[in-house]
Amino acid sequence: MRSKLAVLAATTALATGSFATTAAAQETTTEELREWALEMFQPLPSTTPAIADNPASPEKVELGKALYFDPRMSASGVFSCYSCHNLATGGDDNLETSVGHGWQKGPRNAPTVLNAVLNIAQFWDGRASDLKEQAKGPVQAGVEMANTPDNVVAMLNSMPAYVSMFEAAFPDETDPASFDNMAKAIEVFEATLITPAPFDAWLNGDDAALDADATAGLELFMDKGCIACHAGVNLGGQDYYPFGLVEKPGADVLPEGDKGRFAVTETVDDEYVFRAAPLRNIGVTAPYFHSGKVWDLETAVEIMAESQLGEPVTEEEAGLIVAFLQSLTGEVPDVTVPVLPPETADTPRPVYMQ
């Protein structure tokens, strides 16, 4: 099947009555490809995305960063947001499923926190509408941080330095060190984790930002229909789709019992439906899928082609698509590890799983 790009190039050549030189043809190809890509994708914003009901401030960002790194947010004092969303390893933990309280394993692979503010909702099943709602979930989950809102608030208010940070971040509130404000501060910090990539430079007109393999992979990615689920600014994360639209993967990829969004909506049509994974930084966030069972990106591409599109890709095609996906690996903002407020005699003591 000839791609949309090839048809456009051939039509242009025939209309002019002659074929262009190699250099001119390449220029036309790049122009047409970018035009098509800009119909499907958007480059990352150049500034931190604003959150309508949670305005940012430097004080709120700094507070959110401290909370993100603080293991005392967990009942055991061992696990922090950073434990499962390591900014040095792609914004996730590079495990099949995360390890939490009492060394329990969670049910799903941890998504990256990088660019997560751009997703329509959070978690694989979309059960949290935004990052502040998401931030409350792991803190209270028994297999993750196993804490309670009351214990978190007691911990925060036991440390004068934290109290001062909350007062600076939420200056108009009488009781700023609250569970809700904890989540708001983390949300504002996480919204700063935007990672501009070579693909963004290319979308913005820099032809040299993608090499020939990545450009060919982009064309294949669009031509074969991957853009049906993986489009927009985050190349995914914007809607929900059945996993196994054409053919369900085997149990080694899609474990029995996890029915995805059905657990949220209790609607039969949502069985095995998941939020499409955003593909930014996919090259550094193995393993893949909500099960975390696939460690090789090329294999993941092959599985998706068969299960979602019903059209196998060749080894060469998979390699080119992976070359494009690697161009989505972005530059992580510089984040210094904070020095956290010291504990006091009133700080709740760690609780370990018996």
Image (cartoon, grey):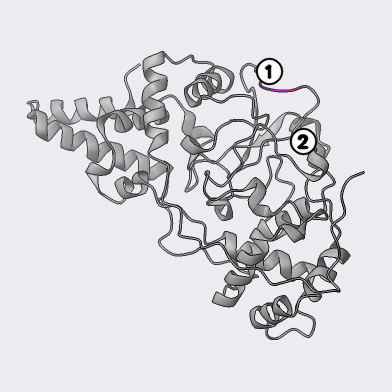
Type of amino acid at the residue the image marks with label 1: Asp
Judge left or right: residue 215 versus residue 171: left
Q: Which mark is residue 95?
A: none
**Residue positioned 46% across, 27% down in the render:** 225
Q: Is residue 221 visible?
A: yes
Image position of 185 with respect to 147: above or below = below
Q: Estimate the x, y position of residue 293 in percent, counting from the top left.
A: 64, 25
Q: Which residues are magenta?
A: 250-255
**Residue positioned 58% across, 59% down in the render:** 190
Q: Secondary structure at mark 1?
A: loop
Q: Secondary structure at mark 2?
A: loop
Q: Nearer the viewer, residue 212 or 168?
A: 168
Q: Estimate the x, y position of residue 234 in percent, counting from the top left.
A: 50, 46
Image position of 312 with respect to 292: above or below = above
Q: Which mark is residue 105?
A: 2
Q: Estimate the x, y position of residue 71 in percent, counting from the top left.
A: 72, 57
Q: Residue furthest right?
A: 354
Quadrant holding the C terminus: top right
| Marks 1 and 2, how far apart at CA | 17 Å
Q: Nearer the viewer, residue 278 or 161?
A: 161
Q: Which mark is residue 252?
A: 1
- The secondary structure that dominates the magenta segment is loop
Type of amino acid at the residue the image marks with label 2: Lys
**Residue positioned 54% across, 41% down in the render:** 278
